[in-house]
Image: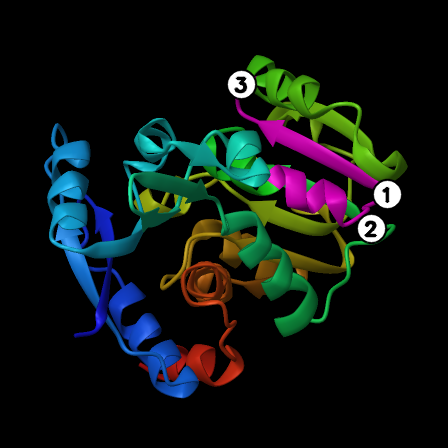
Amino acid sequence: MPDRYAVIGHPVTHSQSPWIHAQFARTTGQDIEYLRLEAPLDGFERTLDAFRAAGGKGANVTLPFKEAASRYCSELSARARAARAVNTLKFAGASRYGDNTDGAGLLRDLTVNLGRALTAQRVLLLGAGGAARGVLAPLLEAGPQRLVIANRTLPKAQALASEFAPARDGTRLQALGFEALGGESFDIVINATSAGLSGAALAIPVSVFRRGALAYDMVYGRETPFLALARASGAAAHDGLGMLVEQAAESFRLWRGVRPETATVLAALRAR
């Protein structure tokens, strides 16, 4: 009988994770079954408990349960503690281990798939919510020259920057409001806000994209106003589909002890 895994969220019918993990299992010769678990908003723990009782070995966690997942765990990885959120659960007996692979997935997509090292680069991270928090530590560890957290409400950005200061490897970490971005320019601009999900435009100047910049929206599967603005400026614009695949590969490695090859899966997913 195959080992059972799942993605849990609300809603979850749109999730590409079952297809992605089926490809990983096929290419690595792993015998797994991967399901979708739609949990009611007030039934996250109850749904997971039933899945574990039925033999579930682990799960990916998507919105809106990542923070609840961190409270559900009996043990957290260092990156899950930093993110205060969990997107990967591993079950063994009574142990409920939680990890956060989002930041690692983003970093690998940027550096391997897109060929853009962060070392000595000027990086702008838009947003100061859970998505930004989840990727901030790995971004800092990559050694950018400067990393600015910009948010519509400055105090929220300042609180996040203060929590992660002092930055690693001499990176200058700073918080700004959107209105203070005029005259600033960056090599890499990452949108970690949810604006793209609603089609909302961000109040940022086109000048944030310096010549040769890379723009990255963590939302995937749509042309967001952020990506349109970046392309209009001449920046190389990319959505978050690669991050989705790479964070899934990190989860797979945690569960099965082998990291699957991702390039062909990402290409096939884009073709779909």
Marks 1/3: CA–CA distance: 24 Å
Mark 1 and mark 2 residues within 8 Å of each other at the beta carbon: yes
Mark 1 burial class by Cα count in 10 Å: few <14, some 14-19, many 20+: some
Position of residue 124 in the picture relative to residue 11 (left or right): right
For residue 268, above or below residue 33: below
Task: Say what amino acid the circle numbered 3 marks.
Answer: Thr
Q: Secondary structure at mark 3?
A: loop
Q: How was the colour assigned to the protein in this rendering?
A: rainbow
Q: Quadrant of residue 58?
A: bottom left
Marks 1/2: CA–CA distance: 5 Å
The numbered mark at residue 145 is 1
Q: Quadrant of the C terminus?
A: bottom left
Closest to the observer, 31 or 66: 31
Residue at 60%, 48% in the rendered image: 190
Q: Is 77 contained in the magenta span?
A: no
Residue at 28%, 56% in the rendered image: 57
Residue for badge 3:
153
Q: Is 152 contained in the magenta span?
A: yes
Q: Position of residue 164 (x, y in %)?
A: 69, 25
Residue for badge 2:
121
Mark 2 and mark 3 residues within 8 Å of each other at the beta carbon: no
Q: Position of residue 125 (x, y in %)?
A: 63, 39
Task: Say what amino acid the circle numbered 2 marks.
Answer: Gln
Task: Say what amino acid the circle numbered 1 marks.
Answer: Gln
Marks 2/3: CA–CA distance: 25 Å
Please state the extent of the stretch shown in magenta in the rendering: 136-153
Q: Quadrant of the N terminus?
A: bottom left
Of labels 2 and 3, the one closer to you: 2
For residue 176, above or below residue 39: above
